Image (cartoon, rainbow, N blue to C red):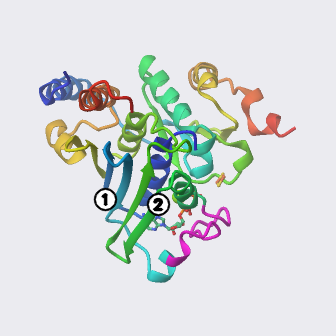
Amino acid sequence: MRELSLNILDIAQNSIAAGASLITIEVAENTKAKELTITVSDNGCGMTEEQLNNVLDPFFTTRTTRKVGMGIPLFKLAAEQTGGSLKIESEKGKGTKTSAVFKTDSIDFTPLGDVTSTITILISMNTDRDFIYTRRLDGEGFELSTVQLKEILEGVPLSEPEVVGWMKDYINEQTNILLGGVNQ
Amino acid sequence: MKSLAELQAIKERTLKAMTARNDSEENTRIVVGMATCGIAAGARPVLNAFTEEIARRSLKGVTVSQTGCIGMCQYEPIVEVFVPGQEKVTYVQMSADKVARVVTDHIVNGNIVTEFTVGSVAK
Ligand SMILES: Nc1ncnc2c1ncn2[C@@H]1O[C@H](COP(=O)(O)OP(=O)(O)OP(=O)(O)O)[C@@H](O)[C@H]1O
Ligand code: FES
Ligand SMILES: [Mg+2]
């Protein structure tokens, strides 16, 4: 993948496929440790211990259209090639948490890219689910929660173009304030 | 600065306009494949381009959605178009700059863009 934000989009699709009603995405940067951590958590169907053991194997998938699952192995590779790592915790019937640490000073660090686009697509294409997106830089951060947005919007769908535009601008603005001139 | 008050205003404007709308079977559906290989091949900008083009032209009765694996990796990004009462059309190896043509020719004017379909690319 050319951008880590595309991996985020892909890993979150696993949560959608797992039937999650709430998907939490966190992108957290620690400048001192030169680390970026991406975490996708869901309350979907989860995995058995056996499934979980198999999941890092690129030949494991529960999908039927193709024999190999590539999403998690690709995400793991992207993290490991920077000197970081990937961890998955899952419990059948409870949910799954996939978390990857990247060393940002590695020459093999893939840029984050357009996270805003990933988040707005996820939200507008899955208006029946809830998403909480959190962006952190050292101690600071902001959050966008569809639970809160839906309360304000009442019947108006999160896929409404004007609403999507608002979310895009909001995330971009908050990200720029947070990063305050620091490059992504 | 984007504020929640602004979102409130969008809601009020939209609620008024929304009353006559329905998400019925009569809608034209544009479906973008978003499995790992689709995303890696560039499905995200294609999906964005469709939603933007439809919003820009204020087209009614057209929905954009995502699906998982369509089963033809080498042809990703794949887009399926379902016009009510017609056979499904599958566009392959899509890119954001092909989107405007599909919207204008196919969605608006009813002419399939044959050169982007799986039938002609596979030849
Ligand atoms: N969040 C999750 N909840 C439940 N099961 C999961 C989750 N993430 C992954 N899995 C399981 O792990 C398998 C492998 O995931 P992976 O993303 O690598 O491949 P895939 O989704 O099957 O296919 P691809 O991502 O290549 O389109 C999935 O098929 C699914 O069974
Ligand atoms: S895995 Fe490639 S089209 Fe589904
Ligand atoms: Mg996957």
Residue pictured at 21% horizontal, 29% vertical: B15
**Residue B44 point in image, percent of width and height:** 52, 37
**A114 and A31: which one is in front?**
A31
**Residue A174 point in image, percent of width and height:** 24, 30
**Disc 2 + disc 1, Cβ < 8 Å:** no
Query: Is B62 on the left or on the right of B1, as rendered?
Result: right
- Quadrant for the N terminus of chain B, please: top left
Q: Residue B9 bears which disc, if any?
A: none
Residue pictured at 51% horizontal, 43% vertical: A109
The answer to if A88 sits in the magenta stretch is: no
Residue where numbered disc 1 is placed: A21
Q: Chain of mark 1?
A: A
Asked if B9 appears above or below A78 in the picture, the reply is above
Q: CA distance from mark 2 to mark 1?
A: 27 Å
Q: Chain of mark 2?
A: A
In the image, farthest residue toward the right: B123
Residue pictured at 64% horizontal, 38% vertical: B86
Asked if B98 appears above or below B32 in the picture, the reply is above
Asked if A105 appears above or below B21 in the picture, the reply is below
**Residue B112 point in image, percent of width and height:** 69, 27
Q: Residues within 10 Å of mark 1 (few under 14, many from 20)?
A: some
Element under label 1? loop
Residue where numbered disc 2 is placed: A85
Q: Which residue range is magenta in the image?
A: A53-69
Element under label 2? strand
Query: The disc labelled 2 sits on which kind of residue?
Result: Ser
Q: Residues within 10 Å of mark 2 (few under 14, many from 20)?
A: some
The image shows a total of numbered marks equal to 2
In the image, farthest residue toward the front: A32
Query: Is B83 on the left or on the right of A47, as rendered?
Result: right
Query: The disc labelled 1 sits on which kind of residue?
Result: Ser
